Amino acid sequence: MSDRRKFIKLSMLTSAALLAGKKLFANTAPDPEYKYPVVKDAAVVVSTWDFGKEANAAAWTVLGTGGRALDAVEKGVKVPEADPNNQSVGLGGRPDRDGKVTLDACIMDENSKCGSVAALEHIVHAISVARLVMEKTPHVMIVGDGALQFALENGFKKENLLTEKSEKEWKEWLKTSQYKPVKNIENALPGGKSNHDTIGMVAMDSNGNMSGACTTSGMAYKLHGRVGDSPIIGAGLYVDNEVGAATSTGVGEEVIRIVGSHLVVEFMRQGNDPETACRKAVERIIARNPAAAKEVQVGFLALNKKGQYGAYALQEGFSYSVKNGKVEEVYQAKSVFSSKKQ
Ligand code: SD4
């Protein structure tokens, strides 16, 4: 090929690549509206499930007095962590199949700083260990024995997290040893009280800064060492201070596959409101594996920079709690599948 022909071919290829690039960019460019103006004093906190209401109240003691969202979410999620009757977070959490309570938690602030612990044993406030990882180490994530060692070196107290109640239930479970996540177990307790799982909390403070926290004992009777979505930045939690924040609950394996919380934030960046962004992420799970999606629960919860919030779940029964200057409520999220429709 002559040099001239080579040159023409190359410039044609380059133009085609540029055009393709332009098209690609046009498809992924952020909505021009995505940089929301900061609404002063628009402090708000949202969290998963109905027990989030109590956690939100604790977070509000920080947000309502002009404090930082990061401090608010840590303080908020410490409430269910310390509650022995909440069998899915911290003290009293259901153990793995070997009878060990192993905790997963992560935290993220308005500067994209983040910290995480996974498969952590014997420490009630996994979220505070995650925060310490964020603030005192060059790392994002510390797991297992290393996480315990780090916590103990930093003054955390070693405790037995397995309560009598959780131990009794585990021994009962051992009789069959059937491992299958039960969808909608959140409706199982009398009086409509939640029996689910994992607190994910995201908040915006009165300076318009966002943070999030997520903490759990994970799926009950999991394999020892199993880690879910909750401590994984982007899966169980994601915060982008320009756009918004999201968190998830449910079967973590499904959330990790689609990097769920990050996906929700990206959908918001494209101009979707929080509920639509959550619905689109749920639909992505279904698109990946329609048959499996019918059998499990996953819920997403999101907050944007305007202080708007929304949620969506695979199955009915996912509730979320909201607190701002005007509202203190528990809402039922919409879902794709419903027992009424089936
Ligand atoms: C996990 N996502 O470990 C957590 C559990 C959960 O509702 O949120 N259940 O997979």
Image (spheres, helix red, strand yellow):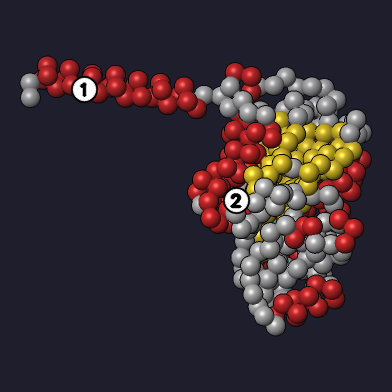
Q: Which mark is residue 255?
A: 2
Residue at x 53%, y 55% (from the top left corner): 291
* SS of the residue under disc 2: helix
Residue type, numbered disc 2 = Val
Residue placed most toward the observer, 84 or 48: 48
Q: Is residue 268 at all visible to an observer of this figure?
A: yes
Quarter assignment of residue 7? top left
Q: Which of marks 1 and 2 is in front?
A: 2
Image location (x, y in percent) of residue 246: 68, 40
Determine whether 191 is above or below 159 in the image.
Answer: above
* Side of 283 where 13 appears, left or right: left
Q: Is mark 1 on a helix, strand or loop?
A: helix
Q: Residue furthest bottom?
A: 175
Question: Is the distance from the Cβ of mark 2 to the nearest ligand 1 atom less than 8 Å?
Answer: yes
Which residue does the image show at 29% across and 19% down from the upper left? 15
Write the residue at 46% across / 22% down.
26
Residue at 77 percent of width and 57 percent of height:
186
Mark found first going from the N terminus, 1 or 2:
1
Q: In this view, does 248 lie above or below 164?
A: above
Disc number at residue 10?
1
State the CA–CA distance, disc 1 to disc 2: 43 Å
Q: Where is residue 54 in the image (x, y as percent from the top left)?
A: 89, 48
Q: Position of residue 85 (x, y in %)?
A: 87, 64
